[in-house]
Amino acid sequence: MNVDFPNINKRQAGAVLFTALIFLIMLMLLGSSAMQTSSLEERMAGNTRNRDLAFQAAEAALKQAENTLTTWRVGPWTGTVPAGLANNPTHTNDVSYWGDVDNWASYKTATVSGASATYIIEKLPDIGTVEQYRVTARGVGGDTNAVVILQAGLSYTPPP
């Protein structure tokens, strides 16, 4: 049995399909944008974790150098022992110098879990009877692009 509804406008047939397709395209664009945002946030979190690992490794290296002060302070300060350097007053104490130090791996390695760290100890000029040292530590996080360089000054007063 075929019923004909004479009042229905034949031109409206398919309008619902077209509207549904427009809504699907809008939802697809919204979902794609949300996916890109969450992917970017995940990479940012990973990079922050790697930098934190590098920072913690550099701090551990500074602490290890401080804890072993009495062992390494006797020298010799010729630059030939691991971690020991005589102070070179001609070099600048900035990122450009320490970022370009040749072969950090040949210096003293600190024990750090999850990251690697090395440090260099420089003998600075004494102030009276107080011995002065500068420790520069380089920590590398989860990947080789996450590098942190920290410095600390250490003083030692020998017993009379």
Image (cartoon, helix red, strand yellow):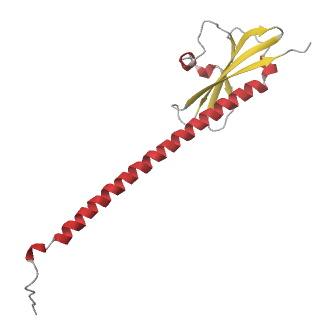
**Residue 73 visible:** yes
In this view, the residue in front, 53 or 152, is 152
Where is residue 44 shown, x and y percent of the image? 49, 42
- Classify residue 14 by image quadrant: bottom left
In this view, 97 is above or below 38: above
Which residue lies at the image location 41% right of the left edge and 49% below the top edge?
37
In this view, the residue in front, 121 or 35, is 35
- Report whether 30 appears left or right of 66: left
In this view, the residue in front, 142 or 47, is 47
In this view, the residue in front, 119 or 34, is 34
The C terminus: image quadrant:
top right
- Labels in figure, total: 0
Which residue lies at the image location 61% right of the left edge and 37% below the top edge?
53
- Report whether 28 appears left or right of 135: left
In this view, 122 is above or below 40: above
Which residue lies at the image location 82% right of the left edge and 20% below the top edge?
70
